[in-house]
Image (cartoon, helix red, strand yellow):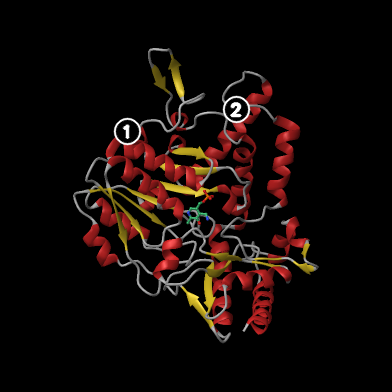
Amino acid sequence: MEKFDINKIRNDFPILKREVNGKPLVYLDNGATTQKPKFVIDAITNYYEEMNSNVHRGVHYLSQLSTDAFEVTRRKVQQFINAKEEAEIIITKGTTESINLVASCFGKAFVHEGDEIIISAMEHHSNIVPWQMLCEDRGAVLRVIPMNDKGELDMKAYEELLSDKTKIVAVAYVSNALGTINPVKQIIEMAHARNVPVLVDAAQAIQHIAIDVQELDVDFLAFSGHKMYAPTGVGVLYGKRVLLDAMPPYQGGGDMIKDVTFEKTTYNELPFKFEAGTPNIEAGICFAAAIDYINSLGIENIKAHEDELLAYATQKLKAIAGVRIIGEAEYKSSVISFVVDGVHPYDIGVILDKLGIAVRTGHHCAQPVMDRFNIPGTVRASLALYNTKEDIDNFVAGLTRALNMLL
Ligand code: PMP
């Protein structure tokens, strides 16, 4: 772990030096979005100072520079997840758009009345609502894999849900509300045994766990740049070429066409067929810097560091009287959610904020998870590569103080 010098890493993130409410910032809301290293912030400035121009259009020098830089990101994403070809990397606005794209386009091509779509009980709203909308549109039926009290999927129930009617399975790799790491490889193998493709929502996995799409044999993978140290407004849909080729375009507009006449339009090749209009060029280009940054540290080293912190935080929280952790799966990543009976999560969040500690409170865009555990919401601390045991100690001290005031 020589590469992983936490003091040096923290120095890379300017915002971590600031104070909030007169206290040093303790940032534990990384599941919502991560902070950006200077390396990425400099890339943003460099983009506007050196190459700002539209992509895939101009013959002029700057446009070629920005197009090349945008395409470098595509190549780096391809390598990062080990996709077979660059054309399988669609640049989107983020996870939400990536999932909507599949629900809409795969849905148009393959989902009909009476067909079934399987999701899980621990999905983010982004991986529920697009499928509900599709079901409503096509007269299809949404099926949900239940979970146990520890927040683990019931794989036997999943086996029983899979049928000849199933058209696609869509599950989170890591639950944003519970931290559960789902057995996606097994989920994919079981679906493929019935020729059913699988979409994996990797929004909370890509920044913590090494993902090899060919090894997983996943059909679609969705994630967001902003949760992996890149700017907001950019994300990825990976899809197998055979499926992407069989799907109609998502939106119509510039870039996604080959020829347009009023009688008929022909569509561009992959990946451009799914990339209508001017993308978020700045974010798209600077995404490459975030991937370089992660690679410079090594995703395995990041995982080891975060796993150690998660174990430390879990043990510390369990020692506080009244704290009940929601989601105690055997395999977890970077998220610790909890409630304190008799105290509203929001009140804890407000007091922690006064102490400079940023956590998220509420349902975390996963209302069905809260319903499953019969709670209104949780307090969620979510970790990133720059967090430390000192952050956890400050958080635990702040929580203890908050509970002394509230209980
Ligand atoms: N899925 C999961 C598991 C998430 O955690 C999130 C973000 N909280 C999303 C989807 C949606 O990501 P975005 O808002 O970046 O599109």
Q: In the picture provided, is 2 more to the left or to the right than 98?
A: right
Quadrant of the image for the N terminus? bottom right
The residue depicted at 54 percent of the width and 41 percent of the height is: 93
Percent from the top left, x then y, of residue 297?
A: 61, 57
Q: In the picture provided, is 93 more to the left or to the right than 351?
A: left
User: Regarding mark 1 in the picture, which secondary structure is present there?
Assistant: helix
Q: In the picture provided, is 321 more to the left or to the right than 51?
A: left
- Tell me the amino acid under the disc marked 2: Val
- Tell me the amino acid under the disc marked 1: Ala
Quadrant of the image for the C terminus? bottom right
Q: Which residue is mark 1?
A: 246
The residue depicted at 51 percent of the width and 38 percent of the height is: 91
Q: Which residue is mark 2?
A: 55
Q: Quadrant of residue 67?
A: top right
User: Going by the picture, which residue comes out furthest to the left?
Assistant: 164
Disc 2 or 1, which lies upstream in sequence? Answer: 2
Q: Quadrant of residue 343?
A: bottom right
| Most foreground residue, 367 or 150 | 367
